[in-house]
Image (cartoon, rainbow, N blue to C red):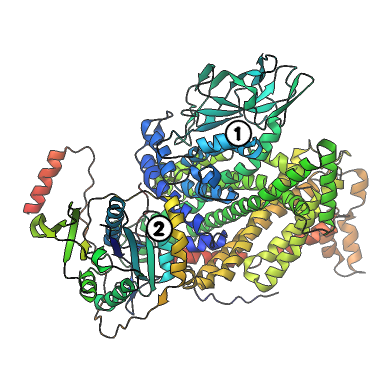
């Protein structure tokens, strides 16, 4: 089979600007967000970059200079971006994309600054998502900067010292008990909480803390708001000796305070003399993290894309000033870019960054769509008094309607459909962007040579690499995300939508063969087949494969899915650029070259994704079967070399062809020199066919990589970085 | 007394970008490169906003001739700095356009401002530009508007209690000339002034954008005849870098070295 590819008319002329990004990430029609981007960029490439360049990251303490960042965030409208106009903010509607854009801009320079900027919103998020109206009004207003008024800063305290630090968010050492409860008065609660790795704690005025009940008169765990002036101990604790994200304040606080029960987030009821919090801490953090984790994923995406310009500049200028590189020579003009390897590796970094950004921004937009629907669902359930099992049954009914394609206009049906996506895309963004992103960031550092691991590396790439590891860890480490995915990705409503995307990708491949969409469609098909197979299959000992404890099965399959989702979103964004690019004259001018480059990157990313999926699926499909051994029975099933030679006279060619298809025992051997008889692919034909097909689908992927690499040699870059070194 | 302060200002390529002249003449990929408001116009806008803030009832207008798609991009930052109303003319912003061609467009745009009152009119702008720097645009605009009180290289404007102006203009030898003027109308071509760049304020931005976006949409496309000017050749200034990087060197020694270098 041969395919003819037309020679590209143009290659990428300049690095993609704001207009390209706004189309890709679907905010070209939102000037409020475009302004916010500029505002956040001003802070990132101004005060934040100066602090990094001047070595302020070298201290664990929250210094006066670091503290100046808070004012910079306030002045630039980043703090108030989370609040609605009713609380003093200036942006209406859901804030997921808003957060995503702020975080992306800040992380372009320093993700610690992004964490510090967003940590206040994380503290407010439990109140925003599950607080009572009175709590929302009070805290959102007080945390919104206003001239002449003190701005309240919050910290979110969930994680604790050992034994529960990190993963185990379901168990808590922090306790709440009743301190005093006078007749007819509001109960007074004693809260004891030790935190670990609590961001913003160096200056927080209030804390939203997760605590478990230690009193039979309080029914469940809850989240509760603590103030710095509450009676008791408010010890901010020592600064955490973290190696990363040093532009955020992180300490291990000790809090032991008396607070009124009205501080329980979401309120409470009293039944038979027992306080029943309206929301357990688990219910609150589930609502919070499924949104905030998306922005963490975008931090790493921003780092990867921010690495492109400094790496290109370094590569091109590598030999300038030396005796051997005279102006006008390829060595002078292109430097290291005369070597294919560095170009190919940078192509991989760029493709990963774009795919990660596409995945993250899609997920942020998805939650913007989900938010109002979720509120409608909550209101509807509340009105109909649906809780517990009744709520679950109603959700299942709605899911069945969505599966059947009925009542699509019903907001509740729409909600369950989108929610099933959100439950997958959120952990996928967090897992893939930060995990694979951290690995890819190491590649970016390596492309800068020894310079990469110095403090003055342009673009602060060494810092970014280290920071990426924290992003892979906080707000739920990789194991937590894999665990969540292993459950949510088997939701039939999600799988039904996933299945529909496969022909969608084929259709795109038909109109845009250079995107790698066909490769991806085959990989998606393989992933789905493998999941279905593993859900039914058993291992060599007869144990079921797809079970919750079998993380060797479920986790790799979750990893594989992430590759697919990221590559697919990247393709969809590139098609959006093709559709909307001509409408904007600043994009239209070089659109042909930009599109060619982006489609090549898509192809590269899809091929890589397919490779990963093929490897993982093949390991899982075959890996749990025991390899056949050389038993007397299996040895006797082999042809003997002498017998074949004898048959050669009767059936010409049998001696050579038999060796290609089965095991042959040579003279003097008991059996062939290998682990055992070759594995028979019985009942696996569908998989092996798909595997072969997918390998063939990789055709052209490396040509795309060559083209993208060539673009990297030609693209115009600015004279210098727009932030200090 | 209140003022109608009209700031004339266009866009120039971001100074960090690589600028490569190509036939036309034009700059390679200029439309795709990020732009900023011309730095001198930028300063005059801050001065205008500062004056309007201190003189109740005053209003700032920004009149700009530029490709409107590029101008929209730039407004995402500029629009957050100070309250103003944009009057956009969709035309070229290239450094290869002559002052004599741009000035009439600016003057016409200023005349089109509803309720324009010559007795309150202050026309601000840069005394030169990062893209051309002929230093003549503001003077021609003033003449076309019939404003004879013109000041160039302005660093400071002080409004007296009687409404008169005291103006510091840059002159040779690093000195300032102090001029007095009875009041509006006047044209002030600003140098750098002394005000810092205001921080971004998205609230102001949101307010401005409600009028900026419609102004951009209704910006009239204008062609500029370039036949009158011929460019014989275009080249980038040669880079001359005599940089020496030193660390921990006392300031006295640095000063001695510089003096010695000057005396060479």
- Please give left or right for residue A185 compared with residue A25 in the image: right
Binning the other alpha carbons within 10 Å of mark 1 as few (below 14), some (14 to 19) or many (20 upward) gives many
Residue A297, x across and y down, in percent? 58, 46
Residue A135: mark in rendering: 1
Q: Nearer the viewer, residue B150 or A505?
A: B150
Q: Chain of mark 2?
A: B
Name the secondary structure under disc 2: loop
- Please give left or right for residue B208 compared with residue A131 in the image: left
A418 up-or-down from A583: above or below: above
Residue A667, x across and y down, in percent? 84, 52
Residue B79: mark in rendering: 2
Q: CA distance from mark 2 to mark 1?
A: 34 Å
Q: Chain of mark 1?
A: A
Badge nearest the viewer, 2 or 1: 1
* Residue found 17% across the figure and 57% down from its top: B165
Binning the other alpha carbons within 10 Å of mark 2 as few (below 14), some (14 to 19) or many (20 upward) gives many
Q: Are marks 2 and 1 on the same chain?
A: no
* Residue found 66% across the figure and 20% down from its top: A186
Is residue A475 shown to the viewer in this render? Answer: no
Residue A683, x across and y down, in percent? 88, 55
Image quadrant in which the N terminus of chain B is located? bottom left
Residue A346, x across and y down, in percent? 50, 56
Name the quadrant containing residue A184.
top right
Q: Residue furthest bottom?
A: B227
Q: Residue furthest left?
A: B263
A610 up-or-down from A264: above or below: below
Is residue B101 shown to the viewer in this render? Answer: yes
Name the secondary structure under disc 1: helix
Image quadrant in which the C terminus of chain B is located? bottom left
Q: Nearer the viewer, residue A171 or A97?
A: A97
């Amino acid at each position: 089979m041969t395919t003819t590819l037309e020679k590209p008319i143009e290659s990428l002329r300049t690095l993609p600007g704001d207009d390209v990004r706004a189309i890709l990430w679907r905010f070209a029609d939102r000037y409020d967000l475009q302004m916010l981007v500029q505002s956040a960029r001003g802070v990132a490439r101004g005060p934040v970059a100066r602090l990094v360049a001047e070595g302020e990251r070298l201290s664990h303490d929250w210094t006066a200079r670091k503290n100046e960042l808070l004012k910079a965030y306030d002045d630039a409208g980043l703090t108030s971006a989370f609040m609605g106009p009713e609380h003093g903010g200036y942006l209406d509607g859901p804030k997921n994309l808003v957060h995503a854009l702020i975080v992306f801009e800040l992380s372009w320079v320093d993700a610690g600054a992004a964490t510090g900027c967003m940590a206040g919103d994380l503290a407010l998020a439990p109140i925003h998502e599950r607080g009572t109206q009175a709590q929302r009004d009070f805290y959102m207003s007080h945390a919104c900067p206003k001239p002449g008024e003190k701005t309240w800063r919050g910290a979110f305290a969930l994680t604790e010292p050992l034994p529960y630090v990190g993963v185990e968010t379901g168990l808590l050492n922090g306790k709440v008990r009743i301190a005093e409860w006078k007749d007819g008065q509001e109960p007074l609660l004693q809260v004891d909480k030790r935190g670990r790795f609590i961001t913003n704690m160096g200056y927080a005025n209030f804390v939203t803390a997760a605590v478990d009940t230690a009193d039979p008169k309080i029914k469940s765990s809850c989240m509760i708001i603590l103030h710095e002036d509450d009676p008791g101990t408010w010890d901010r604790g020592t600064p955490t000796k973290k190696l990363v994200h040093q532009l955020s304040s992180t300490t291990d606080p000790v809090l032991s305070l008396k607070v009124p029960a009205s501080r329980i987030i979401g309120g409470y009821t009293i039944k038979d003399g027992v306080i029943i919090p309206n929301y357990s801490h688990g219910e609150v953090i589930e609502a919070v993290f499924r949104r905030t984790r998306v922005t963490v994923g975008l931090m790493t995406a921003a780092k990867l894309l921010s690495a492109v310009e400094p790496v290109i500049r370094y590569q091109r200028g590598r030999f300038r000033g030396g005796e051997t590189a005279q102006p006008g020579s390829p060595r002078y003009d292109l430097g290291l870019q005369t070597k294919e390897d560095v170009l190919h590796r940078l192509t991989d970094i760029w493709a990963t960054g774009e795919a990660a950004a596409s995945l993250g921004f899609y997920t942020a937009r998805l939650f913007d769509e989900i938010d109002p629907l979720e509120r409608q669902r909550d209101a509807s359930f509340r009105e109909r008094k649906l809780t517990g099992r009744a709520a679950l049954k109603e959700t299942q009914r709605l899911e069945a309607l969505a599966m059947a394609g009925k009542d699509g206009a019903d907001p509740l049906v729409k909600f369950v459909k989108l929610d099933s996506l959100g439950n997958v895309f959120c952990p996928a963004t967090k897992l893939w962007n930060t995990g694979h992103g951290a690995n890819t960031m190491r590649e970016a550092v390596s492309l800068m040579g020894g310079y990469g691991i110095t403090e003055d590396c342009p673009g602060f790439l060494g810092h970014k690499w280290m920071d990426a590891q924290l992003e892979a860890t906080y707000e739920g480490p990789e194991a937590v995300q894999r665990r969540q995915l292993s459950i949510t990705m088997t939701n039939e409503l999600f799988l039904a939508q996933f299945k529909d995307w496969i022909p969608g990708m084929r259709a795109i491949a038909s109109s845009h063969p250079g995107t790698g969409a066909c490769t991806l469609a085959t990989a998606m098909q393989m992933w789905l087949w493998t999941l279905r197979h593993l859900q039914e299959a058993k291992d060599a000992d007869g144990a079921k494969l797809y079970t919750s404890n079998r993380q060797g099965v479920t986790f790799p399959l979750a990893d594989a899915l992430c590759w697919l989702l990221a590559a697919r979103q990247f393709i969809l964004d590139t098609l959006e650029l093709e559709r909307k690019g001509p409408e904007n004259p600043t994009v239209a001018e070089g659109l042909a070259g930009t599109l060619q480059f982006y489609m090549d990157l898509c192809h590269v990313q899809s091929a890589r994704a397919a490779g990963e999926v093929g490897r993982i699926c093949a390991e899982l499909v075959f890996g749990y079967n025991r390899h056949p051994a050389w038993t007397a029975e299996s040895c006797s099933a082999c042809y003997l070399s002498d017998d074949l030679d004898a048959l050669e006279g009767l059936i010409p060619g049998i001696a050579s062809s038999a060796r290609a298809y089965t095991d042959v025992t040579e003279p003097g051997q008991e059996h062939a020199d290998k682990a055992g008889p070759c594995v028979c692919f019985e009942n696996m034909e569908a998989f092996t066919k798909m595997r072969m097909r997918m390998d063939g689908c990789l055709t052209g992927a490396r040509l795309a990589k060559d083209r993208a690499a060539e673009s990297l040699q030609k693209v115009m870059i600015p004279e210098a970085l727009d932030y200090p070194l | 007394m209140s003022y109608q302060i009209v700031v004339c200002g266009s866009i120039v390529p971001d100074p960090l970008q690589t600028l490569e002249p190509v036939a036309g003449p034009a700059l390679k990929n200029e439309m795709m490169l990020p732009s900023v408001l011309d730095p001198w116009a930028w300063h005059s806008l801050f001065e205008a906003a500062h004056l309007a803030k201190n003189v109740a009832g005053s209003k700032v207008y920004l009149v700009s001739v530029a490709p409107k798609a590029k101008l929209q991009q730039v407004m995402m930052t500029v629009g957050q700095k100070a309250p103003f109303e944009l009057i956009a003319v969709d035309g070229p912003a290239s450094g290869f356009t002559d002052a004599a061609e741009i000035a009439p467009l600016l003057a016409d745009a200023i005349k089109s401002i509803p309720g324009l009152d010559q007795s309150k009119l202050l026309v601000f702008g840069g005394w030169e530009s990062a893209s051309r720097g002929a230093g003549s645009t503001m003077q021609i605009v003033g003449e076309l508007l019939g404003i004879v009180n013109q000041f160039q290289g302005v660093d400071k404007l002080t409004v007296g209690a009687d409404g008169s102006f005291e103006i510091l203009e840059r002159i040779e030898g690093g000195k300032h000339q102090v001029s007095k003027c009875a009041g509006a109308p006047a044209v002030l071509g600003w140098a750098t002034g002394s005000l810092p760049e205001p921080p971004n304020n998205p609230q102001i931005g949101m307010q401005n954008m409600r009028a900026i976006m419609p102004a951009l949409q209704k910006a009239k496309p204008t062609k500029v005849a370039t036949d009158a000017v011929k460019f014989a050749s275009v080249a980038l200034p040669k880079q001359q870098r005599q940089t020496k990087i030193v660390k921990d060197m006392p300031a006295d020694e640095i000063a001695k070295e510089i003096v010695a270098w000057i005396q060479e």
